[in-house]
Image: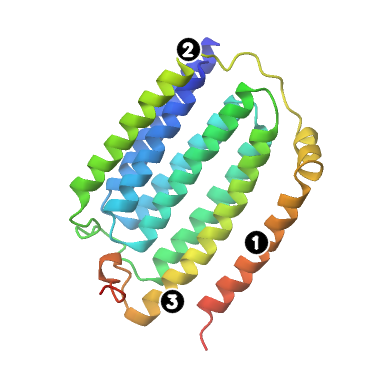
Amino acid sequence: MYLNQFLLLAAVLFCLGVYGVLARRNAVLVLMSIELMLNAVNINLIAFGAFRDNVIGQVFSLFVITIAAAEVGVGLAIVLLIFRNRADIDLDELDLMKG
Amino acid sequence: MVAQNVVFGILAVVMVIAAFRLVTTQNVVRAALFLAIVLAGAAGIYILLAAEFLAWVQVLVYIGAVVVLLLFGVMLTRAPIGRDADLDNEQRLLGALVALFLFGSLGAVLLDAFGDQKVGTFGIRRTAEVSDSIFGDFVIPFELASILLLSALVGAVALARRD
C-alpha cells in the first residue's frame, strides 16, 4: 500500500468539506462539512502513524476525535440559540455585525 | 497486499461518492446519513491501517454520538425534512473553484513529497501501547482534554438553556 493513496483520499475528503463549508446555507450542514474535514485529518494522522510505525498518530487522532465531539456539542448549542433568537439558521442572514 | 488494495479501493470509492453527495444533496436528513457512511468508511480505513481501537472509537463516538447529535440539531431547528432547493448559497461556483485549487495544490505537494513511498510492513499495535503513550508522554494533553470536555459541557448547557 502506498502512503499517497491514503493522503490523496484524505485530501479529496478535505476539499469536499471545504466546498461544503463555503457553499452551504444551513448551519447544521456546515457543521457536518466541518466533521468531514476533521475526519480527513484523522485519516492523515493514522496513515502517518502506520508509515512511521509508531502509536503517536493514533494518540493524536484520539485527541482530534475528543475535540471534534466537544466542538459539535458547543456548535449545535450556538445554532440552537441562533434559531431561538431569529427563527432561522440561514448563515447568509447572519450579518448583524456587517458595517 | 492485493486484498488490502481492493478493500481500500472499494472504501475510497464509497467514501468519495458519499462525501460528494453530502455536500451536494438538497435534503438535510439524507446529508446526515451520507455523513454516517463516510464515517463508517473511515473506520474501515483505520482497520486497514491496523488501528482497531481507533476504528471502534470512531464508530462509537462519531456514528453513535455525533451523527445522532446532528440529527437532533436538524429536528430542533425545524429544518425542512424533505427536499429543499434553498440549501446552497450563490457562492457555490466560487466555493467549487477554491476546493479544486486546494485539491490541485495539495495533490501536487503530496505527489512531490511522498512520490512512491510505501506504508510498508507496520507492526500490529496493541491498545495497551496506545494507552501507555496517552498516560505516559501525553498525560498533560489528556488532562487538558478532560478540562476542555467539561467546559464544553457546561458551555453547551449554559448556551442552550431556556431561562
The kind of residue on which mark 2 rests is: Asp
The residue that label 1 is drawn on is B148
The residue positioned 58% from the left and 28% from the top of the image is: A48
Other residues around mark 2 within 10 Å, as few (<14) / some (14–19) / many (≥20): few
Whether residue B56 appears in this view of the structure is no
Residue A29: give x, y in percent of width and height. Answer: 36, 56
> In which chain is the residue bearing label 1?
B
Residue at which label 3 appears: A81
Residue B28, how many percent across, how many down?
Answer: 33, 57
Check the residue under mark 2 and report the chain it is in.
B
Check if mark 1's residue and mark 2's residue have beta carbons within 8 Å: no
State the SS at label 2.
loop
Q: Secondary structure at mark 1?
A: helix
Query: What number is the disc on residue B116?
Result: 2
Compared across the picture, whether A77 is left or right of A54 comes to: left
> Which residue is most to the front?
A99
Quarter of the image containing the C terminus of chain A?
A: bottom left
